[in-house]
Each structure stands twice: as C-alpha cells, then as structure tokens.
Image: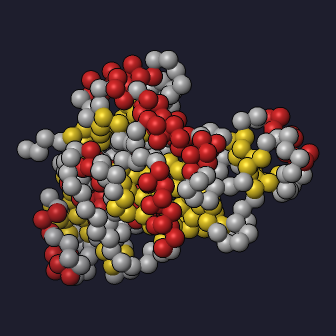
Amino acid sequence: MINKRRVLVFPCGSEIGLEINRALANDIHFEMFGASSLPDHGKFVYKNYIEDVPFVDKVNFIDEINKICEKYKIDYIFPAHDSVVLKLAQYQNELKAQVITSCVETCEIARSKKKTYEVLKDTILVPKTYSINDKNIKYPVFIKPNVGQGSKGARRCNTKQELAVAYNNNKEIVICELLPGKEYTIDCFTNSNGELLFAKGRVRTRISNGISVNSRAINNPKFKEIALKINEKVKFSGMWFFQVKENLNGELVLLEIAPRIAGTMNLYRVLGVNFALLALYDKMGFDVKIITNNFDIEIDRALYTAYKTNIDYDCVYIDFDDTLIFDNKTNTNAIKFLYQAKNENKKIILITKHEKDVVQSLKEHYICKDLFDEIIHIAKADKKINYIKCKPAIFIDDSYSERKEVSEKLNIPVFDLDSIEALINYKN
C-alpha cells in the first residue's frame, strides 16, 4: 500500500484552492485536505473538508493550523491566498507541516507592490509611481492597493479630484503611471537549487471579479528574459508567477509577482506542467523535469454547479433508449454517474423496452454488460414500475409518464437526463 503524503489547502474554496485540488486529487501519492474559515465550494470538492478555521489575521490562527496538522497528520500546506502565503511563510519554523511557497523574504517582497518595485527597479522595468503630493503627476494615473491581489481595488483616475477621493478612502494605495497596452501573466517554476525551469506567458483576455476567466498561451521570448532577471534578484522556490503590461512604447512593465499557484495555471497544467505536483516533488528532494505538449490552447471559465443532496439509495434503475444512449451516442454524463455508483457499491439495474438485442446494442456502444448487476428487458406495453423491487432506489428515465408513475406510486427520487448532474460527486 502506498504511504500517501497528506496535503492541506487553505483556504480551499478560493479559485487557487480549487486549482490545487484539481492538480493533485488524482495523484496516488497524495491525500488532499481542504480547510476554510467560512463554508465555501471546497465542501463540495474536498473529500476531507475542515471548516471554522480562524481567519488568517486572528491571534490563534497558527495554533489552530498546527492542531489540524497534528490531528490529520498533515505533511504539506498549500496557502491559497496571498495573505495566507505570507503568514505561513513567516511562521514556517513553528508549523507542524512544510509550507509550499518561497522563503519569507520573497513572500514579504511580493506582498507589497511598493517593496516589489523598489527591489526590482534596477533590474527590470517597473511602473513610474507618484506620491500624493507630487506636482508632476501626469493624468490619467492608475491606482491599486499596496497590499492586494487580482485587480480588486485597482482603477484609473482621470483627474486630481478623483485621485484625492481615492486617496482619502485608502492612503495605502500605489499611484502608478497608466499602462495602456496588453496585460500578460507569466507562469514560472524554480527548483530548490534556484534554477528557473519554466517561464511561459498567457494573455488575460477577460477578467471577472479580479480573476482571469479567459486566457490563452502566448509565446514571447521576452517573458523568459524578464523571468530570468527576476529569478536572479529574488529567491524563489517552486511555483510563482508575475504579471506585466505594455506601456505606451510597447515595453513590458512589471505589475506584480506572487510566490503561489495562480488559479489559471491550469492552462499550462493541461499542457503537462503541473505546478503543484512539481512543487511537492521538489520539496521532497526529487530532481524534477518538465515536459510540455506543443499545441495551441485557450481556457474559458464560468461558474459550474455541484450539488449536495440527502438522497439515500442502494440501487439505481436506469433506462437505455434516449437515456443511457442519446441521439445514438453514449450519454457520458450517465456513464460517469454509473461508474461513480459502482465505486460506491450501489446496485445498478438496466431496465428497458429496447426493440433489439440489448446486450448487442450495449456492445455496439462499447458499454460492458457487466456494468449492470441485472438487465431487465420488458415488452413495450409493460410498465417499468412493476419491476422496481430493490429499495431504497432511484429511477433514471427520459419518459415523463414513467417517471411520474414511479414517483407517485413508489415515492422514490426520479431523474431526467438534465438532472443527472445532481447525482455527480465531485469529491476526490
């Protein structure tokens, strides 16, 4: 039996935390644990979910994280928010598990835009910044919180009056020159020896709530040049990324750096660069290598739905025509659910009025008959309700009349094709 290393992600319901889970949940060497301060989507995707963890700014935060690490025998912690990255890095020596990020000095630089620009101003292009009393401010300007993430709190100010209002609301803003060109994120990986193994960019085509929701890979040799210069100046370990934007002359100017997983790093993950997995193996002392697929790719994200129900069932009755097979093709959602049910030791019964040899039809669609504990093949005039004997059960059928009769007379849950998704378990 493989001795799995235990990985804690906090906060696990952020886009970063969800990406870490997607990256690691199917690796047999690790067992995932998700923790959050408030109930979040992590509850629907982490099999091991811990809630009511103190917020990162609470005095007992580190003590509670240590209690979790001891109770669940956690080996590694992935911080999934910039404030958590810094906090855990600062307390690494007191923690009962190893934090997957760079050293505390790097995390402190990355958490402050002012400090980032100060450290790197002689190495790469950083934005021209102004003090609020600067008489040479050229409008419009762009303001953003000194400590922040994504594009939250960042905006353009066209006039002195607009800037004054913004400054009065938050005196910890950074006042920058306006960069009008395209914005890019460059995903990077540096091993424990300080060698930059990977640095490739993606364009942030569409942003929602400060998060990149549409992105595609961009090949620009300047990205690697900038990454190498940053890597020489700032000490990274594992995954990190930086963002740049074009100025009026088309030059790439730094926006920020971050020593953590980015939510859209899955763009390169599906090309073969699993940053979270690489970071873990690197921390474990392995000499990691990177292999990437060479094809064009674009990612687009939107809200997806996961469900939690109180359905208790031991048996699944499912129809064949227009249910398991739809438009003469295998219904992959139904198949996914059936294999999930099989993994959970549910009994699966195919009940059908199929006009042909049902076993042969299953074979033609590459569905193994052994997936079913029983196949009930009935006449067209017969009623399926007469054959549903196993309980508790659920019934899946495209026929409204069949579902209505089963629901009313047997009082069990019934599902059409569109509602199978409520039965899918996303927890790994």
Q: Residue at x 92, y 45 (%)?
A: 161
In the image, residue 145 sits, relative to residue 232, either above or below, namely above
Residue at the outermost left position:
1
Question: In which image quadrant can residue 70 be found?
Answer: top left
- Quadrant in which residue 153 is drawn: top right
Return the x and y of residue 381 as percentages of the image width and height.
30, 71
Image quarter of residue 363: bottom left
Q: Nearer the viewer, residue 328 or 69?
A: 69
Viewer-proximal residue among 339 and 212: 212
Q: Specify the quadrant that holds the N terminus.
A: top left
Q: Residue at x 61, y 52 (%)?
A: 121
Instruction: Please tell me how many numbered marks the rendered image carries.
Output: 0
Residue 297 locus on image (x, y percent): 45, 74
Q: Is residue 129 left or right of residue 304?
A: right
Residue 413, how many percent across, how many down? 38, 49
Q: Is residue 384 above or below residue 391?
A: below
